[in-house]
Image (tube, rainbow, N blue to C red):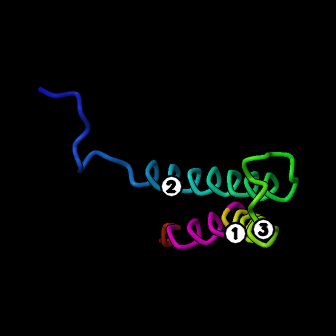
């Protein structure tokens, strides 16, 4: 008999938690990328215009704070 979990044995909350945390991590990376573009300390990013940095920063903040809240509300279990 296999030790691998079957489709019926999986808890959907575990996958949902992983997706929410992945969204937060990607938002944090986008914010760091935006700051890297705006700081002008990296020669490889010297040709990137500042508006791109502001867009990365804004999308990252929304991705970090707003999207996990929306997903959590959408995936909330109905009250009995």
Quickly name the residue at label 1.
Answer: 59
Mark 2 surroundings: few (<14), some (14-19) or many (≥20) residues within 10 A: some
- Mark 2 to mark 3 CA distance (whole Å): 31 Å
Question: Compared with residue 8, is residue 60 higher up or lower down, i.e. above or below?
Answer: below
Quickly name the residue at label 2.
Answer: 19
Residue 2: assigned label: none
Q: Is residue 66 left or right of residue 38?
A: left
Q: Position of residue 74 (x, y in %)?
A: 53, 73
Q: Which quarter of the picture shows residue 71?
A: bottom right
Mark 1 surroundings: few (<14), some (14-19) or many (≥20) residues within 10 A: some
Residue 49: assigned label: 3
Q: Is residue 34 left or right of residue 79?
A: right
Q: Marks 2 and 3: CB-CB under 8 Å?
A: no
- Mark 1 to mark 2 CA distance (whole Å): 17 Å
Residue bounds of the magenta highlight = 64-75
Q: Position of residue 47 (x, y in %)?
A: 75, 60
Which circle's residue, 2 or 3, is located before the other in the chain? Answer: 2
SS for tag 3? Answer: loop
SS for tag 1? Answer: helix
């Amino acid at each position: 008999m296999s030790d691998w979990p079957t489709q019926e044995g999986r808890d959907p909350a575990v996958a949902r938690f992983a997706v929410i945390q992945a969204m937060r991590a990607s938002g944090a990376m986008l914010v760091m990328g935006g700051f890297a573009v705006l700081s002008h300390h990296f020669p490889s990013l010297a040709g990137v215009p500042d508006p791109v940095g502001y867009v990365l920063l804004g999308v990252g903040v929304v991705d970090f704070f707003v999207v996990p809240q929306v997903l959590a509300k959408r995936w909330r279990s109905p009250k009995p």
